[in-house]
Structures are given as C-alpha cells and as structure tokens.
Amino acid sequence: MADQIFETVVTTCSAAGAVHVAPMGARYVGDEVVLMPFKPSTTLDNIVGTGVAVLNLLTDVRVFAGCVTGRREWSTVPAGEVDGARAVRLACALGHAVLRLVEQREDAQRPVLRLARVHEAQHAPFRGFNRAQAAVIEGAVLISRLHMLPAEKIDGEMRYLQIAIDKTAGPAELEAWEWLQQAVARHRAAQARVAG
Amino acid sequence: MTRLLVSVRDADEALAAAGAGADFIDLKDPAAGALGGLAPARIAKIVPVLRARCPEIPISATVGDLDAHERETILRRVADVAACGVDYVKVGVSPCAAAAPLLSALARCGAPVVPVLLADLGVDAALVEAALRQRAFPALMLDTSDKRGGSLLQRVPVEVLARFVALVQGWNCLAGLAGALRADDAAALRKLAPDFAGFRSAVCEGGRAGPLDPQRVRGLRLRLAMFTVGSRPRPAHTQSEDRARA
C-alpha cells in the first residue's frame, strides 16, 4: 500500500526572517510529521537552517492554486518561537502545528525530514469535504506538470474536474479554478504554432 | 507568424509591454548581463501584478548568467524562479563540455525550462539535437551573450538560423531567436519564421539598459506581423493599430 499523503501548506522562515509558503505533501508517522521537500528548495534550506517548520491545514484552496500560478503572497501570523527560531502560520489555516526537525535523511533528490510536533492549535472547524476544493487541489497538481503532459490529457482531466466545480464550488474555489484555467490557456497560447 | 517576446525588468515595464502587444513577457535584469536574472523575491512580486492585469500573457524569467559547470547553482536558481509561478524558466547554456550534462539535468528537474543556447561562437548543432532528444523542453532559443557584437542575424549566417528553426520545429518544439535583435531585423525574422523572437535593446530608449518604450513595442509587433499572406486574423490590438495608420 502506498503511503497516505496529506496535502498541506508548509510555512518556513529563513535565518534572516523571510517567510516562505509552499504546498507540500505530508506523511504522518506516529506523532511525527515526515516531509520530503525537493532538493534544492527554499523550504528544505529553511527547515535545515532553522530546524523549524509550520504545518498548515486549510480548506482555502486558493493558496494551493495561487502558489503554482504566481500568487505567493499569503498573509501569515506569528506562531511563536522554537529555540529562538521564528515560526509563522497562514492566517487562513483551520489549524496548524509547529514542528521541530528531529532527523534528516539525505537523498540526492528528496531528503526525508522527520519532524516532531512542538505545539498545535485549532482556529476554525473543518466543515466537511468539498468536491470543488478537491478538484482545485488536483488541478493545481496538473498545472505544475503542464509542460510534461499531452494536451488531451490536460483537457480531459480539467473537463472532469470541472463537474465538481460546477456543482459544489463557492467563491474561493471559483477564483482558484479561474487561476488554473488561465494557466492552461496561457500554456495553450504559448504552445500553439501560429499560422502565417 | 512570429510572436514577440519582450524582456522587462519590473512590473511597470511588464504592463507597458503587455499593453503594447507583446505576446510573451520575459523577466530579466538587462544591467546584470545577457541573461541577467532578477532576484526571485522581485520576480515573485512582479508576477502577481501581471497575472492580475493580464492573466492571459505567458511569463518567462531567466535564472541569470551562470556557467554551465555550476550545475547545482543553476538547478537551485531554476527551482527558486519556478517557485515564483512563472510559466517558463529560461536557462542560458553556452557550448562547452558541461552543456550536455546540464541539459539532461534540466530535463529532469520538473520545472518548465527553456534552454537558451548562446550562439556567439556559432550554433552547436549537436547540442541542439541533444536538447531536443530530451523531449522535455517546451521551447528552445538561440541568444548571444555579448550584445556588443551586433544582432544575432549579423553574427550567425541566416541559413544556420533557418536550419535551427526547422530542426527545432521538426521536433514539435517552439523555436525562439534573440540576441540584440533590431527593428530592421523584422523582415529577415518573418522569413525565418521562428515561433517567437525576443527583444530588449530595440524596444528601449538608448540601449538595452534604458527604459522600455511601448511605442517601439507596438511598431515591432506590426513589423513582425506584416505581409503574412493567408495568415489568421491578427489580434485586436494590431488591427486597431492598422486602422490608426490607414
């Protein structure tokens, strides 16, 4: 069986204090959180550099769609300190966990980071599954692979995901979906060979 | 028809170029070298401004002038720039022993990379083939690193450029030409018919480090699109330009 992976957003800070927001799959092993950021990446540098990360659980899927389409400015609020290192969480997080790095297993492409939960807090209730939110997450993954996938596959998947958007989206999901559709349109426009 | 890629260094220039009919916006710092890169933090600020006003325009950004031997540094910059949410990441590749291994690393990095082969010393056909064989790049470009040596069209024989365009397009990859291209090169570019042509100095006042002039972008857009027989209708902005001239 494949590892169960949860779509989260990880917020980290550089040693200089610059905040970095990145969607990331998380695995839960016992009480610990396992992250596998790509190498090289700012998230990896920040976690290794400061020993701290914050796991954000959220249903505002605009963050996921925004990060893959050039909208990276999401408001954050302080979430305390760990051994003097600053932690911030997303303002829109339903809940967050402040994490401390306990083990780093080297890998040429994706090092495995084991993190312990230092502090956890809930800010808003989880209101249940929303299919449009799931569709936006799937769409965001698709958009990050646009240049590797054939046009028919992209169209087919977007058409299928559109059903859940049409039936169950709220304003935030519609906005996020529009960003993803624009990304597909840009890709299409760029790749088209213009006649004449 | 050849589309127009315009290199800009900030949000104001990006919006001006997009408004004047540029088909692609390319983020770079002309003062920092041929493919001078803007800091990712600056790219991350420009992209959302452009997305909000012109969501339809594809954006590329360069990683900066880096030697092909600095593979780790290049891959890190590619990841940083791609994380800004641009559509394409341009990476300059000069012909040398490290070029082919760099191309295969770029092909596997997961980001939408457009290799820009530096053609100051000619076009390395084997390197072009090596890049195409990866089947991982949405486009392939030629550019020059020393902008003082004249336009790409003065530096590289036109039949060599024609072979490059044909070869790249034959692999169903987009072919792009750049390198101190002048407005006067438009006629030759129309004949070569690359998928896009990149400009900086020709759309600026007083050279590539000077401010962008939207009027020159408009003029160039028209000259690139002119006299194409049997072409599809032009986008609305150039049609209005035609009326203004008539």
Image (cartoon, rainbow, N blue to C red):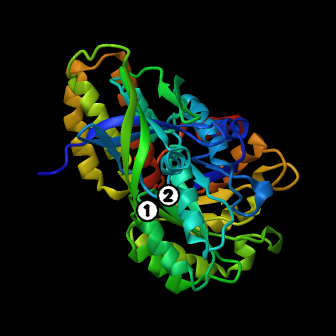
In-front residue for pair B21/B100: B100
Tell me if residue B219 can be seen.
Answer: yes
Q: Position of residue B171 (x, y in %)?
A: 39, 72
Q: Residue at x 40, y 22 (%)?
A: A93
Q: Residue at x 66, y 35 (%)?
A: B15
| Amino acid identity at mark 1 | Cys
Disc 2 is attached to a residue of which chain?
A
- Circle 1 — which element? loop
In-front residue for pair A193/B130: B130
- Circle 2 — which element? loop
Q: Residue furthest front?
A: A83
Tell me if residue B228 can be seen.
Answer: no
Q: Position of residue A20 (x, y in %)?
A: 54, 38
Q: Residue furthest right?
A: B206
In-front residue for pair A129/A110: A110
Please give the count of numbered marks on the rendered protein: 2
Using residue A140 as the reference point, say whether residue B83 is left or right of it.
right
Dot label at residue B109 = 1
Badge 2 crowding class, 10 Å Cα cut-off, few under 14, some 14 to 19, many 20 or more, is: many
Using residue B154 as the reference point, say whether residue B168 is left or right of it.
left
Q: Position of residue A100 (x, y in %)?
A: 44, 40
| Amino acid identity at mark 2 | Pro
Badge 1 crowding class, 10 Å Cα cut-off, few under 14, some 14 to 19, many 20 or more, is: some
Q: Position of residue B96 (x, y in %)?
A: 61, 84
Of discs 1 and 2, which sits in the foreground? 2
